[in-house]
Amino acid sequence: MALYSTEREKILRDIFDTAILRDIIERHKIRNIFLMKTMMRALLISKEFSANKFYNYLKSQQIKSSKDAIYNYLGYLEDSFFIFMLNKFSLSYKKSEQSIPKIYFIDNGLLRINFVDDKGRLLENMVFVELLRRNKDTAYYQNATKNEVDFVIKSGKKIEELIQVCYDISNFETRDREIRSLLLASKEFSCDNLLILTMSEEEELKVGNRKISILPVWKWLLKNRG
């Protein structure tokens, strides 16, 4: 098992290096390799990414860069299907595109080999990749008071489903936060299809006139497989 784990890590490391060095740096003739690697580290350690804030950070560290280069590099990473940027939901296309995106990676293994071991983030990343596989039109929700729902599933302008991802919902404060955010979004979007995905908990909740399904992620993953 240890040998398998070591081999798997080596394969993932080779894929990571190949994707960055060959598919991106060589193909796009990137000269500022240090900037690309610094940006990759920033993407790996944070769930959201603001190109403007990253540019200001580089300036504060006296690292030469330009906003155009940062946006270009992000585009290269997206075009290679290495990362995906999920915008905040808004009925205004312009506001949605201008929102600070959440960052997801094509494979959890790429996060793990870069020492990302946040179980909640890994679970959320897995769910995003599955939504991508199911060809769902997805955004995230956040209101003015920072209540957030991880995934808003859309069909045109209609909201079909609201999904919250939480590794462990047994803590009262965590449970209250996740449910409250779902209910606020449910009211705003008139959506009654509410789901919380966890690592192991399963329950059907009735809150007022709304029902919330709590499912272990493995059960959800098995749905609509084919």
Image (cartoon, rainbow, N blue to C red):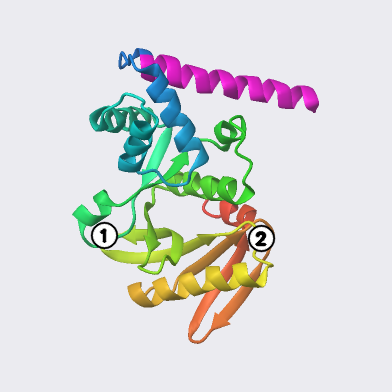
For disc 1, the marked residue is 156
How far from the left and from the top, in percent, is residue 121?
A: 56, 48
Report whether 170 appears left or right of 17: right
* Residue ID at (56%, 35%): 111
Q: Secondary structure at mark 1?
A: loop
How far from the left and from the top, in percent, is residue 179?
A: 53, 72
* Residue ID at (48%, 17%): 18
- Picture layout, residue 124 above or below residue 113: below
- The residues colored magenta run 1-25
Image quarter in which the N terminus is found: top right
The rendered magenta stretch, by its main secondary structure, is classed as helix
In this view of the protein, which residue sits in the foreground, 68 or 14? Answer: 68
How far from the left and from the top, in percent, is residue 215?
A: 61, 63
In this view of the protein, which residue sits in the foreground, 9 or 61? Answer: 61
Could you classify mark 1 by the number of other residues whose Cα lies within 10 Å: few (under 14), some (14-19), or many (20 or more)? few
* Amino acid at pointer 1: Gly
Report whether 22 appears left or right of 121: left
Q: Are marks 1 and 2 in contact (CB under 8 Å)?
A: no
Q: Secondary structure at mark 2?
A: loop
In this view of the protein, which residue sits in the foreground, 83 or 224? Answer: 83
190 within the magenta span: no
* Residue ID at (48%, 48%): 128
How far from the left and from the top, in percent, is residue 205?
A: 59, 77
Whether residue 91 is visible, yes or no, is yes
Rendered image: mark on residue 168: 2
Quadrant of the image occupied by residue 92: bottom left
Report whether 78 appears left or right of 95: right
* Amino acid at pointer 2: Asp
